[in-house]
Image: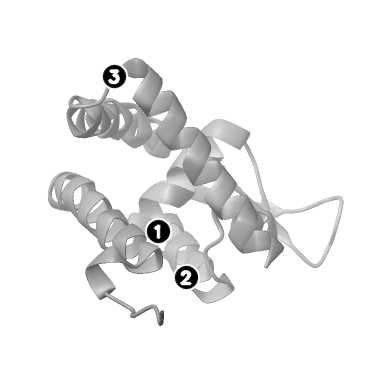
Amino acid sequence: MTRRLKLDDYLPYRLSVASNAVSGLIAGAYQQQFGLTIPEWRLICVLAEDGALTQAAIVTRTVMDKVTVSRAARTLVDKGLISRTENEGDGRSHLLTLSDQGRRVHGEVAPMALDYEARLLAGLSEDEVVQLKGLLRRLQAGAEAG
């Protein structure tokens, strides 16, 4: 029996559609209120969690491409939300750090993002949420392993 590809049942498609819907919902809120794109918000979050990082480290951490990270970083520097300083450990790169204003924006947007997440997950039990997150990590690991 030959299997047929049915787009609505195809996992990569379902993941992509779900990801776009979720990101779009949340992104609309911080775009409207703070003028941030999805890559800019991700960069702010990573710097809030991890502290000063190089752009290369952000690329690795977020799995965003170099150009996207570079554009987001440039825009956030221009907006005064992050600062860019020499990396004393490596003269070829710079460290990106949240500014005081960037920390304030993160402090305002993070609770909003968590509220959206809680609403998205409201129909799932606590065990289902843990299971879902575990399954997503395993899918990502499988994709990265090739």
Which sits earlier in the primary sequence, circle 3 or circle 2? 2
Which sits earlier in the primary sequence, circle 1 or circle 3? 1
- Of circles 1 and 3, the one toward us is 3
Colouring of the image:
one colour
The type of residue carrying mark 3 is: Ser
Question: Marks 2/1: CA distance?
Answer: 7 Å
Q: Residue at x 67, y 68 (%)?
A: 146
The answer to which of 70 and 29 lies nearer the viewer is: 29
What element does badge 3 sit on? Answer: loop
Task: Report which quarter residue 18 is drawn in.
Answer: bottom left
Q: Which residue is mark 1?
A: 39
What element does badge 2 sit on? Answer: helix
The type of residue carrying mark 1 is: Pro
The percent position of residue 52, horizontal first and vertical second, equals: 64, 41
Q: Which residue is mark 3?
A: 125
Q: Residue at x 41, y 35 (%)?
A: 132
Which sits earlier in the primary sequence, circle 2 or circle 1? 1
The answer to which of 121 and 6 lies nearer the viewer is: 6
Q: Which residue is mark 2?
A: 68
Is residue 118 visible from the viewing direction of this image?
yes
Relative to 8, does residue 140 appear above or below in the rendering? above
Instruction: Tell me the crowding category of disc 3: few under 14, some 14 to 19, or many 20 or more residues within 10 angstroms, Cα based.
Output: few
